């Protein structure tokens, strides 16, 4: 199955911790995972954050997308983990993926 | 079209409206013939503690009572890892709530998660 | 035509989720999908009339642009009544909605059962906030 996760909460929040648990569970369970980060969720895309395990997700075939405007607003554009994609229109891509590609959608 | 829904409660009861809102929606989903599963995770597992007295103590609806309007029409799961992190076990929970391991929980999302709502 | 239901639990301005919901609704409408927005808990504040913002994008104005494009908006009566939006006791018979003069045109207050009804008609659901 293709799982889409949308995270709008910051990395150390309870919501983000729950989300990341299910992201990895889905990936380890052999499902396709696309992880969309918007709002405060973009803090998860910071490469140097010691708690971020997103590099593990990328090396295991997960897709990660972060919203440019939210990264810019927070001064994070230069700190994004390599491999995280920054679409030109994040919400357009998310809608397309949700409506045409996803089997399961979870948002936190 | 969507035929099943997972209600995922991540918030503790009483301090915020989320847990109550999630269970209220679960009841409405069941009344509308949607296959429904309730999953308690994180602080949401506290919603399943025995011995709650919301009405008497706060004047709020007692969250635990809502479970009896959901079960047995729907399963109610409490995530084992969340219980363990909080020093809780099956004996602490309302009897109709079942602990569930992570791998089994993934199967719940696969099988019933055509819509998944996080509270 | 495929349908998307958005479910919003947070009020306007207190979190970014309302803006995210509006952005998702706009993109989905532009792509030709039917879009429903169900408001729950503090989400019922979102369609209130008379919002005057100084620095932040005005949510009311946003909704006024999305409703003519096809966005359907309903708010849960339990939540809306608790927050003072319901101005009568019984639903209006023709529309099965509860009376309010406080919401933007196109937004209505309904029983919670409108939400599972929308879920069943939809292809996908995204929940935000809370």
Image: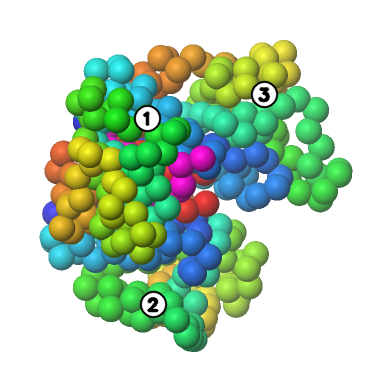
Label 3, secondary structure: give it: loop
**Label 2: which residue?**
C57
Q: Position of residue C113 (x, y in %)?
A: 46, 51
- Say whether residue A84 is magenta: no
Answer with left or right where residue A64 lies relative to residue B105: left
Q: Camera-side residue: A45 or C121? A: A45
Residue at left 72%, top 27%?
A: B49
**Label 3: which residue?**
B86
Q: Is residue C107 above or below residue C121?
A: below
Residue at left 51%, top 30%?
A: B38
Residue at left 17%, top 52%?
A: A87
Q: CA distance from mark 3 to mark 2?
A: 41 Å
Q: Position of residue A80 (x, y in %)?
A: 29, 46
Q: Is residue B39 above or below residue B21?
A: above
Colour pattern of the rendering? rainbow
Q: Which residues are magenta?
A: A3-12
Label 1, secondary structure: give it: loop
**Label 1: which residue?**
A53
């Amino acid at each position: 199955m293709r799982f889409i996760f949308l995270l709008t909460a910051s990395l150390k929040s309870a919501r983000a911790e729950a989300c990341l648990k299910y992201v990895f569970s889905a990936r380890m369970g052999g499902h396709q995972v696309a992880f969309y980060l918007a709002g405060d969720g973009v803090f998860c895309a910071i490469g140097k954050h010691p708690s971020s395990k997103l590099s593990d997700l990328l090396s295991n075939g997960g897709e990660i997308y972060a919203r440019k405007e939210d990264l810019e607003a927070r001064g994070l554009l230069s700190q994004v983990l390599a491999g995280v994609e920054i679409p030109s229109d994040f919400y357009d891509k998310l809608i397309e993926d949700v409506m045409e590609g996803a089997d399961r959608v979870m948002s936190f | 079209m969507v035929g099943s829904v997972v209600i995922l409660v991540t918030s503790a009861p009483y301090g915020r409206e989320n847990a109550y809102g999630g269970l209220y929606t679960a009841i409405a989903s069941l009344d509308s013939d949607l296959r429904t599963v309730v999953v308690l995770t994180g602080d949401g597992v506290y919603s399943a503690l025995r011995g709650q007295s919301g009405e008497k103590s706060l004047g709020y609806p007692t969250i635990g009572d809502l479970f009896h309007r959901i079960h047995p029409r729907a399963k109610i799961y409490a995530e084992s890892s969340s219980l363990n992190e909080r020093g809780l076990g099956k004996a602490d929970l309302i009897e109709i709530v079942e602990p569930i391991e992570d791998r089994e929980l993934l199967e719940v999302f696969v099988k019933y998660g055509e819509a998944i709502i996080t509270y | 035509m495929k349908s998307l239901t958005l479910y919003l639990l947070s009020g306007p301005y207190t979190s970014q989720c309302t803006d995210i919901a509006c952005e998702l609704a706009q993109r989905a409408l532009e792509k030709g999908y039917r879009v429903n927005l169900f408001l729950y808990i503090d989400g019922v504040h979102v369609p209130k009339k008379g919002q005057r913002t100084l620095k932040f994008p005005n949510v009311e104005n946003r909704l006024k642009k999305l409703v003519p494009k096809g966005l359907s908006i309903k708010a849960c009566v339990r939540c809306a009544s608790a927050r003072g939006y319901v101005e009568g006791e019984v639903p209006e018979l023709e529309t099965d909605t509860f009376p309010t003069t406080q919401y933007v045109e196109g937004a209505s207050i309904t029983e919670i059962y409108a939400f599972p009804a929308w879920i069943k008609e939809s292809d996908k659901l995204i929940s935000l906030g809370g």
